[in-house]
């Protein structure tokens, strides 16, 4: 499904990724762990095409996405990849429903189709009663579920999550983690998750441990 080969990244003199290889299979939940500064978020961003590698290739299915750029890459990212961040990055002036629809509107899908999909996702994620509210009127756990729905709206091949439960209390974190596994079990959704949460990391199908810019165990 996703194959990253020989990924190198420098920030100035800092050699952050030193030849990283990763394969993500369909329907797999992979966690990435390691000490602060090991390069986890940098790797996640490069796999998700939010940042460029200095060297190496990334392919999703048959497509070598590391060679794509501009509008083509933006379109691919919007439709085929989903993202969940620690701070959900919801737009404060829009309702939960509008936030969830945005990647679908960007992809040019009809509003009626999107409204139907939002309703289905909201029921699945347990936020059906919160759709008319703005992010500031939602709990942290609800905000993160809205972000999960937004990541799912275009049915992406892979969802990349960077510390998705880093800002949640332990009960909300646990229920978010259970949701990831439910989405995997019911729909075969793949996830790549950078986390300091040991419980989540251990629950994953595979755990990649990074140290000083390389994967030391997988
Ligand atoms: N845009 C940037 N410019 C310069 N240096 C950067 C940039 N982004 C990350 N770095 C540096 O690259 C190294 C790896 O950062 P990265 O965020 O990938 O680590 P991490 O393993 O995700 O850490 P954490 O667990 O603390 O989030 C760090 O030393 C960081 O300071």
Image (spheres, grey):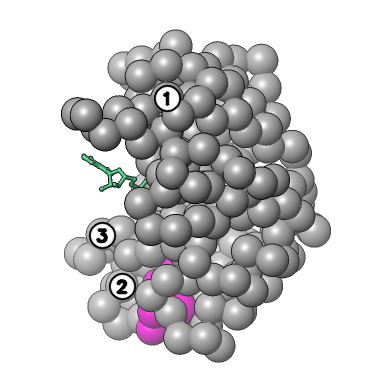
Find the magenta span and give its range. Answer: 139-146
Residue 109 vertical placement versus 199 (above, below)? above
Residue drawn at 44 percent across, 58 percent down: 35
Packing grade of label 1 (10 A; few <14, some 14-19, many >=20) is many
Mark 2 near mark 3, Cβ–Cβ under 8 Å? yes
Q: Position of residue 111 (x, y in %)?
A: 44, 46
Mark 2 — residue?
Answer: 135
Q: Considering only order in the chain, which callout, 1 or 2, is on the residue closer to the N terminus?
A: 1
Residue drawn at 60 percent across, 44 percent down: 216
At numbered mark 2, what does the secondary structure look like: helix, strand or loop? helix
Q: Position of residue 140 (x, y in %)?
A: 39, 79
Q: Residue 163 lies in magenta, yes or no?
A: no
Residue drawn at 51 percent across, 38 percent down: 214
Mark 1 — residue?
Answer: 8
Q: In this view, does 13 lie to the left or right of 135?
A: left
Q: Position of residue 143 (x, y in %)?
A: 40, 72
Q: In this view, does 21 lie to the left or right of 184?
A: left
Residue drawn at 44 percent across, 39 percent down: 213
Camera-near label (2 vs 1) is 1
**Magenta highlight: main SS:** helix
Mark 3 near mark 1, Cβ–Cβ under 8 Å? no
Packing grade of label 2 (10 A; few <14, some 14-19, many >=20) is many
Q: How far apart are marks 2 and 3 (CA)?
A: 8 Å
Mark 3 — residue?
Answer: 91
Residue 35 vertical placement versus 79 (above, below)? below
Quarter of the image that includes the N terminus:
top right
Q: Position of residue 72 (x, y in %)?
A: 40, 17
Packing grade of label 3 (10 A; few <14, some 14-19, many >=20) is some
């Amino acid at each position: 499904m996703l194959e990253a080969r020989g990924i190198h990244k420098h920030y100035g003199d800092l050699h952050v990724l030193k030849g990283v290889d990763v394969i993500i299979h369909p329907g797999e939940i992979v966690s990435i762990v390691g000490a602060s500064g090991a390069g986890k978020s940098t790797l996640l961003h490069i796999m998700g095409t939010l940042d460029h590698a200095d060297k190496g290739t990334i392919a999703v299915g048959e497509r070598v996405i590391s060679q794509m750029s501009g509008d083509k890459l933006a379109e691919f990212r919007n439709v085929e990849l989903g993202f969940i961040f620690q701070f959900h990055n919801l737009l404060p002036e829009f309702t939960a429903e509008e936030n969830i629809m945005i990647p679908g509107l960007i992809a040019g899908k009809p509003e009626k189709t999107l409204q139907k999909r939002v309703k289905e996702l909201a029921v699945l994620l347990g936020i059906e009663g919160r759709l008319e509210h703005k992010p500031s009127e939602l709990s942290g756990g609800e905000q993160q579920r809205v972000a999960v729905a937004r990541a799912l709206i275009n049915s992406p091949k892979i969802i990349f999550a960077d510390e998705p439960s880093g800002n949640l209390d332990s009960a909300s974190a646990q229920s978010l983690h259970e949701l990831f596994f439910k989405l995997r079990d019911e729909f075969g959704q793949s996830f790549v998750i950078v986390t300091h949460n040991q419980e989540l990391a251990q629950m994953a199908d595979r755990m990649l441990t990074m140290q000083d810019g390389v994967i030391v165990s997988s």
